[in-house]
């Protein structure tokens, strides 16, 4: 089992920045690809970004590319999402998730952290 705990959400004005953190416990963190997802009210959960086990490869949704940066520190069992130039449409609950490197399915999920961007 892997337990994931997100933090760093909050209320920010449009154009501002937040850094979300997700700390893992339970199994070897570096064995897992990590991803960030978000779900806005009334909408389906959507992919935001992911990062390879070493941190050498990243992917982003088009809506956040150039504004958000995913990174990880395997020594601290933590993955980050630096979110800059925030827009009201970025308002959502943000979740981190972990998947085995050989699987396409995210197996472990955090409880989420709320990000609210005011206009």
Image (cartoon, rainbow, N blue to C red):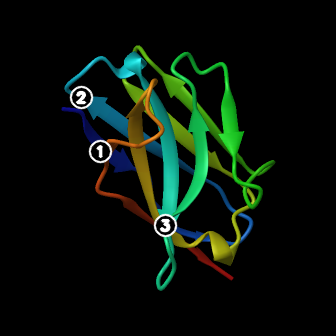
Name the residue at 52% across, 38% down: 80
Disc 3 secondary structure class? loop
The image quadrant where one finds the C terminus is bottom right
- Vertical arrangement, residue 89 with respect to residue 23, above or below: below
The residue mark sitting in front, 1 or 3, is 3
x, y percent for residue 105 = 42, 42
Which residue in the protein does label 3 denote?
A: 45
Q: Position of residue 85 (x, y in %)?
A: 75, 60
Visible residue check, residue 106: yes
Task: State the image quarter where residue 86 is shown.
Answer: bottom right
Please say if the residues under marks 2 and 3 sit with CB atoms less than 8 Å apart. Answer: no
At 72% from the left edge and 56% from the top edge, which residue is drawn? 64
Q: Mark 2 and mark 1 in contact (Cβ < 8 Å)?
A: yes
> Residue shown at 77%/50% (left/top)?
65
In front of the other: 38 or 22: 38
Q: Please give the residue where the numbered disc 1 appears in the rendered image.
A: 5
Observer-nearest of 103 and 116: 103
Q: Secondary structure at mark 1?
A: strand
Mark in the foreground, 2 or 3 = 3
Task: Give me the C-alpha separation between circle 2 and circle 3.
Answer: 24 Å
Q: Which residue in the protein does label 2 denote?
A: 25
In the rendered image, residue 58, in percent from the top left (x then y), is placed at 67, 32
Residue at the image point whose x is 67% and y is 25% from the top: 57
Q: Earlier in the sequence, mark 1 or mark 2?
A: 1
Measure the alpha-carbon separation of dots 1 and 3: 18 Å
Residue 76 in view, yes or no? no
Q: Residues within 10 Å of mark 3 (few under 14, many from 20)?
A: some
Q: Quadrant of the N terminus?
A: top left
Near mark 2 (Cα within 10 A), the count class, few <14, some 14-19 or many ≥20, is: some
Relative vertical location of residue 77 with respect to residue 115 in this rendering, above or below: above
- Mark 2 secondary-structure assignment: strand
């Amino acid at each position: 089992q892997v337990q994931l705990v997100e933090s760093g959400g909050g209320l920010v004005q449009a154009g501002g920045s937040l850094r979300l953190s997700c700390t893992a416990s339970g199994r070897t963190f570096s064995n897992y690809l990590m991803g960030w997802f978000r779900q806005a009210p009334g909408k389906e959960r959507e992919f935001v970004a992911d990062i390879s086990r070493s941190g050498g490869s990243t992917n982003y949704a088009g809506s956040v590319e150039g504004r958000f940066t995913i990174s990880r520190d395997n020594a601290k069992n933590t993955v980050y999402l630096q979110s800059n130039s925030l827009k009201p449409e970025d308002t959502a609950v943000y979740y981190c998730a972990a998947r085995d490197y050989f699987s396409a399915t995210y197996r472990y999920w955090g409880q989420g952290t709320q990000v609210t961007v005011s206009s």
